[in-house]
Structure formats: C-alpha cells, structure tokens
Image (cartoon, rainbow, N blue to C red):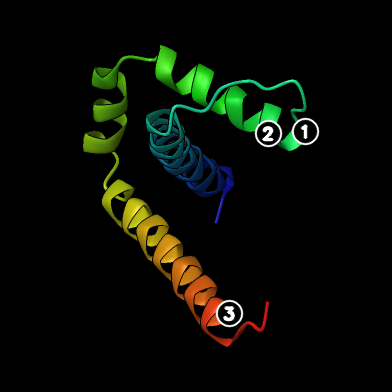
Amino acid sequence: RGFGGCWLRVKWRAECFLVLRGGVGRVLGGLGLESTPINTKGYESLLGVVDTTCKDSFELFFGLYKYNPNSRNELKKLEESLARIKQELDEMDKNSKL
C-alpha cells in the first residue's frame, strides 16, 4: 500500500465525518438548543456544531450524503447507536430505585 491508498482512506473518513457532523448538527438544530447563562464547554461545542452545520445549505449536506457511497451506512450506524443508548437508559430506568 502506497501513499495513495492511505490518502483515499483519509479522504473517505473525512467525507463520512462531514455527513455525520451534518446529520448530528441538524438533529440538534431541530431541538431548538439555545445558549444559557450556565453553558458548559461541552454545550458550547454542541451549539457550535449546530451553528456551523445549519449555516450550510441542505443542498450541500444532501450532496455530501448522495455522493459518498458510505454515508447511508454511517447514518444507519448513528441511528443504531442512538437506539442502543435509549435502550440502555430505559433498562437502567426500569431497574432504578431512585
């Protein structure tokens, strides 16, 4: 494997990241998150993701999605991950004594 193969893997991961970032940013944007007087650094980071992704046109996001052959799989993994988190929370809640 030469440098070219490595570059293609880096490019592919970057494209997948952009699709995931755009998807997550738009999901968070749909929640109507707003700045508060007690923002944490993590919350500020999330607001930054929302701000930058929602400034991009949906057409740009769609293009990243459509022309990356792995984007559907990446978004499916994101969806599955959210479902697992919800399931874990539901299980913990069911077994919680609080």
**22 or 17: which is nearer to us?**
22
Q: Specify the quadrant that holds the N terminus.
A: bottom right
The type of residue carrying mark 2 is Tyr
Q: Specify the quadrant that holds the C terminus.
A: bottom right
Instruction: Give left or right: position of 75 versus 33.
Output: left
Q: Do tag 1 and tag 3 residues touch (Cβ < 8 Å)?
A: no
Q: Which residue is found at the position 45% from the left and 39% from the top?
A: 24
State the SS at label 2: helix
State the SS at label 3: helix
Residue neighbourhood size for the residue with mark 2, other residues' Cα within 10 Å, grouped as few (<14), some (14–19), many (≥20): some
**Residue bearing the label numbered 1:** 40
Q: Do tag 1 and tag 2 residues touch (Cβ < 8 Å)?
A: yes
Q: Do tag 3 and tag 2 residues touch (Cβ < 8 Å)?
A: no
Q: Earlier in the sequence, mark 3 or mark 2?
A: 2
Question: How much space separates mark 1 and mark 3, taking CA atoms?
Answer: 25 Å
Tell me how many marks there are: 3
**Residue bearing the label numbered 3:** 92
The type of residue carrying mark 3 is Met
The type of residue carrying mark 1 is Thr
Relative to 61, residue 86 above or below:
below
Residue 52: x and y in percent read 51, 18
**Residue bearing the label numbered 2:** 43
Instruction: Give left or right: position of 47 versus 31.
Output: right
Question: How much space separates mark 1 and mark 2, taking CA atoms?
Answer: 5 Å
Question: How much space separates mark 3 and mark 2, taking CA atoms?
Answer: 24 Å
Q: Quadrant of residue 38?
A: top right
Q: Which residue is found at the position 58% from the left and 79% from the top?
A: 92
Residue 47: x and y in percent read 59, 25
